Amino acid sequence: MKKILAIAAVAALTAGVSAYAANPFSDVTPDDWAYQAVSDLSDQGVVEGYPDGTFKGERNMTRYELAQIIARLMAKEDQLNAEQRATLDKLAGEYADELANLGVRVSNLEKKVGNISWSGNARMRYIESYKADSGKSTGTWDGRMRIQAKAQVNDSTTVTGLLRQNMHFKDNDEGGTDMQRLYVTHNFGDKVSVVMGKYDEFAGQTGIMYDSEVKGAKVTYGDDAFNVTAGYARFDWNDDSEFAYGRIAGSGAKLAYDVEYYKGTSDHDVSLWGAGLNYNFAGKFDVFGDYYKNTDAKGDPYAWSAGLGYGSMSFAKPGSWRLSAQYVKAEDGAYLGSTTFDTGAAQDLIFDQFSNGDDKDATSIGADSVHFWVVSGDVALAKNVGLHAEYAFDVTPDGGSVKDPDDLFSATINYKF
C-alpha cells in the first residue's frame, strides 16, 4: 500500500483527536489531497518523516512501519471513541507479530478482546491479627486472586466486574469464588457520572474508615481537582445497613482533601461527619489525618488518625518505596468497619454501629475504645510486584473485657497484571 493512502486511512480513524496543525514536511504541500491528514498525524506524534524533512508519501509502506503507527495510536487509545477503538483492536490483531517485536504485545494486545479490557491482581499474605471472638492474636496464611473485566458498552457507558478467589493455607477452607464487584458507570459529558451496582468505596485519607464494597448507587459531579458525590447504599456484609452519604473532595499536586457525611436510614443511630487531609511537602514527605464523629450515638463517639509518610511506591518503578507511621484512636459507635489495615487492631476490638445492631453499648467481646500506632512500608520488588509490611504496636483497648493484645503485624506480596 502506498504510504499516503495508509496515512489517509489512519487519519480517518483518529478524526476528532486533535485540531488542525501546520505541515512539517517539505514534500507535502497544501495542494496535496492528503495534506491535512499528514499534518494532523504529525502533530499528534503518530507519523514521522525522514531526517531530510521529507515524507515520501508515494513509496510503499512496510508492515513494520504501519505497526509503528498502530503502536503510537494505542498509546492514545483513551482519546478514541468506542468505534475507533474497535477498529484499532482489529488492526492490532492483524499486526500482532510486528507489534510484539516493538514490545507492546503484553501491555496492550493480550489484555483486550474486542471491547473488553482485562486486568487483575493477586497476593500472598501472612497476618498476625487480633480476633475478638477468641480473645487472642491469631496467625493466618492466605492468598487471593482477582480478575477484572471492563466492557465498553458505548462512548458513555461501561460495565465492570471483579471476580475474587480466596484461599487459606492453614486449613481446608478455600473460600470459594464470588463476584466481588459488579457495577455500571454512565458518564454524562465530562463532569457527571452515575455508578450503580456493587462497587468499592473508600472513606478518608488515612485508611481508618470504610474501605470495601457497598451495594447501591451514587452520582458524582466534577473532576479530580474538585468533585461532589451523593449516594444511597448498604454495606456488602450486612443487609440491614442502609445509609445515605455525601462527599466533597479534591486533589492537586500537593493537597488532597475530603469532607463526608453518612446517615443511617435503618434502626441504627448513625449520623457520622468526617473530614480528611493529605499534604505533600518537599517533594517526598506528606502529612495526613482524618477525624470522624457520630452525633447520633450515645456520648458522640469519635475516631481520628494522623501520620507522616515519606517516599512514593509505584508498581511500574522497581526499587521505589514508601514508609509511613500514624496514630489511631477510635471509640465504639464512631466506626464503620472494614479498614485498609490488615491487623484488625481496630475493627476486631470495637463495635461499629451497623454490625452491632441496636445494642450499641454492648462490650461482651468488644472495647469501648482502642488506640494504637501503625508503621507501614511498601517497596516495588520488580515491575508489577510489591511488598507491603504493616506493624501495629502499643495496641490498647479501653473498657470491656478485652485484654491488651500482643503486637500485630502483616506481610504481603502483591502482584499486578
Image (cartoon, rainbow, N blue to C red):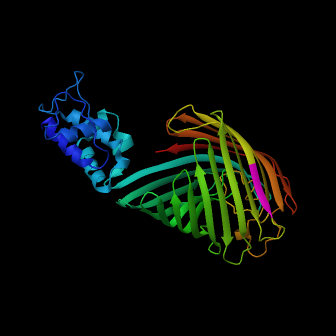
Q: Is residue 291 above or below residue 407?
A: below
Q: Position of residue 192 (x, y in %)?
A: 47, 62
Question: Does residue 349 show up?
Answer: no
Q: Is residue 187 above or below residue 296?
A: above
Task: Locate residue 208: give its quadrant.
Answer: bottom right
| Residue at x 21% of width, y 41% of height | 36
Question: Does residue 410 show up?
Answer: yes
Q: Is residue 123 left or right of residue 42?
A: right
The N terminus appears in which quarter of the rendering? top left
Q: Is residue 110 above or below residue 99?
A: below
Q: Magenta region, mostly helix, strand or loop?
A: strand
| Residue at x 54% of width, y 38% of height | 314
Residue located farthest toward the top when viewing the structure as drawn: 52
Q: Is residue 385 left or right of residue 67?
A: right
Q: Position of residue 197 (x, y in %)?
A: 50, 68
> Magenta includes 303?
yes
User: Which stretch appears magenta?
Assistant: 301-305
Task: Locate residue 338: give its quadrant.
Answer: bottom right
Q: Position of residue 65 (x, y in %)?
A: 22, 33
